[in-house]
Image (cartoon, rainbow, N blue to C red):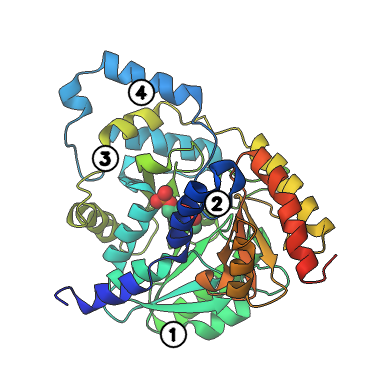
């Protein structure tokens, strides 16, 4: 086989989520789309706000097309970066300028750029279990070492003591994600303060820099008025990876940004490194038309009411038939305990045309993730199938 050994391994471990997505397409062809309950992928089922369409049309009709479709600085259009910085300052009381913002190819692009910038081979990246399945691939891209650390099993909040025990002189990054995929949990201010204190202490002890990389594609998806703490306020060496994939329902358009505060250690090196990393990763720059469009929609977010309705309907339906779930505070995922091994449960669910992702894919066996960013009718039609599944295991 003439491909790299690393890629052979990665291809073999190809995300179970994607595999499930393909399975969804296969089942839909066999049984009809309406008879397949596909909860496998975090692909928003709701349209982008009208303001985005208006912005796109205005830009295409009104601006010089050479400018709109051209290359620009690797970090992105200066006007867009300034607009993003201003919006963040207004919302979070930060003091960003365009020199703290690098436009990115979604959160995935931002994460790759930041890891490429920060990691030397063998550097350790702590992730909190359960964690987004692709973190392992991203860290491996830059020869980093993934160090999974369990969250509190009752609340899925970060466990500061376990993190303290996992930090070594080689720790470069703590990568965290709140609102969380897959649990729907929002990390509290108290949790963040404890984690920040641990990292501050370890930085001092080892004389190293440890960065929190905050992966935030779900920041705007918080229910019941729940606050999502802005991490740069709690910890100086924080880098934020933001994305509009979910907040504007634009996952295929690939647009986000990195916020690198001036207070970070070696800020100038990190910022310049991330600009070059954007280029070397082959992105060159974030998509130009999308940069200009999101800059005109900074006050907009997708309406989260349908997600909220789905959340309540699914939680009630599942718990009524005896399943145990985390009631999500954010994002659009339900994290459900499985009465048997999670892969066995996934296969049993498939027999009812229900597609879910096993917890093992997130480093946490014994659970499945159910993505409820679907039509509400899909959930309503799936609940009787979930009930039959619950009956098979004697839960109701
Ligand atoms: N991080 C997490 C936790 C995610 O759930 C996702 C996508 O589902 C990403 C990153 C990638 O997001 P993007 O589409 O913005 O690259």
Q: CA distance from mark 4 to mark 2?
A: 29 Å
In the rendering, at what x and y percent does residue 210 appear? Answer: 42, 72
Q: CA distance from mark 3 to mark 4?
A: 17 Å
| Label 1 element class | loop
In the rendering, at what x and y percent does residue 31 appear? Answer: 55, 48
In the rendering, at what x and y percent does residue 117 appear? Answer: 27, 63
- N-term mark: 4 or 1: 4
Closer to viewer: mark 3 or mark 4: 4
Would you call the spot at circle 3 few (<14 residues within 10 Å), some (14-19), or many (20 or more)? many
In the rendering, at what x and y percent does residue 169 appear? Answer: 39, 84
Instruction: Judge left or right: residue 328 versus residue 94.
Output: right
At 54% from the left and 78% from the top, the residue drawn is: 149
Instruction: Judge left or right: residue 334 versus residue 81.
Output: right
Residue indicated by mark 1: 168
Can residue 389 be seen here?
yes
In-front residue for pair 301/134: 134
Q: Which mark is residue 230?
A: 2
In-front residue for pair 52/382: 382
Closer to viewer: mark 4 or mark 2: 4
- N-term mark: 3 or 1: 3
Instruction: Judge left or right: residue 273 versus residue 2.
Output: right
Would you call the spot at circle 4 few (<14 residues within 10 Å), some (14-19), or many (20 or more)? some
Can residue 77 be seen here?
no
At 65% from the left and 62% from the top, the residue drawn is: 335
Are discs 4 and 2 less than 8 Å apart at CB? Answer: no
Are discs 3 and 2 less than 8 Å apart at CB? Answer: no
């Amino acid at each position: 086989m003439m491909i790299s050994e690393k890629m052979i391994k990665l291809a073999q471990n190809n995300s179970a989520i994607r595999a499930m997505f393909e399975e969804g397409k296969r089942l839909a062809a066999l049984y009809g789309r309406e008879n397949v309950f596909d909860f496998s992928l975090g692909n928003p089922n709701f349209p982008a706000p009208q303001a985005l369409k208006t912005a796109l049309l205005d830009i295409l009709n009104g601006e010089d097309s050479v400018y709109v479709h051209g290359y620009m600085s690797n970090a992105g259009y200066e006007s867009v970066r300034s607009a993003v910085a201003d919006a963040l300052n207004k919302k979070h009381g930060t003091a960003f300028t365009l020199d703290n913002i690098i436009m990115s190819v979604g959160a995935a692009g931002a994460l790759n750029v930041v890891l490429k910038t920060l990691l030397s081979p063998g550097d350790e990246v702590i992730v909190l279990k359960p964690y987004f399945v692709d973190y392992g691939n991203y860290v491996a891209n830059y020869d980093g070492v993934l160090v999974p650390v369990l969250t509190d099993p009752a609340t899925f909040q970060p466990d500061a003591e376990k993190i303290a025990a996992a930090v070594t002189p080689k720790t470069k990054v703590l990568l965290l994600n709140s609102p969380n995929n897959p649990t729907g949990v929002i990390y509290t201010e108290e949790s963040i303060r404890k984690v920040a204190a641990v990292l501050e202490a370890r930085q001092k002890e080892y004389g190293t820099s440890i960065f929190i990389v905050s992966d935030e594609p779900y920041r705007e998806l918080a229910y019941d008025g729940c606050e999502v703490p802005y991490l740069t306020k709690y910890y100086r060496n924080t880098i934020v990876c933001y994305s509009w994939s979910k907040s504007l329902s634009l996952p295929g358009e690939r647009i986000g940004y990195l916020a690198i505060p001036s207070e970070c250690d070696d800020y100038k090196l990190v910022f310049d490194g991330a600009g070059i990393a954007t280029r070397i990763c082959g992105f060159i720059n974030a998509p130009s038309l999308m940069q200009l469009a999101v800059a005109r929609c900074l006050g907009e977010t997708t309406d989260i009411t349908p997600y909220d309705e789905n959340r309540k309907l699914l939680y009630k339906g599942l718990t009524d038939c005896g399943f145990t779930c985390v009631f999500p505070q954010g994002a659009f995922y339900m994290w459900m305990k499985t009465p048997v091994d999670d892969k066995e449960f996934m296969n049993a669910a498939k027999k009812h045309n229900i597609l879910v992702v096993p917890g093992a894919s997130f480093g946490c066996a014994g659970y499945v993730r159910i993505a409820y960013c679907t039509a509400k009718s899909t959930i309503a039609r799936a609940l009787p199938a979930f009930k039959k599944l619950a009956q098979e295991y004697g839960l109701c």
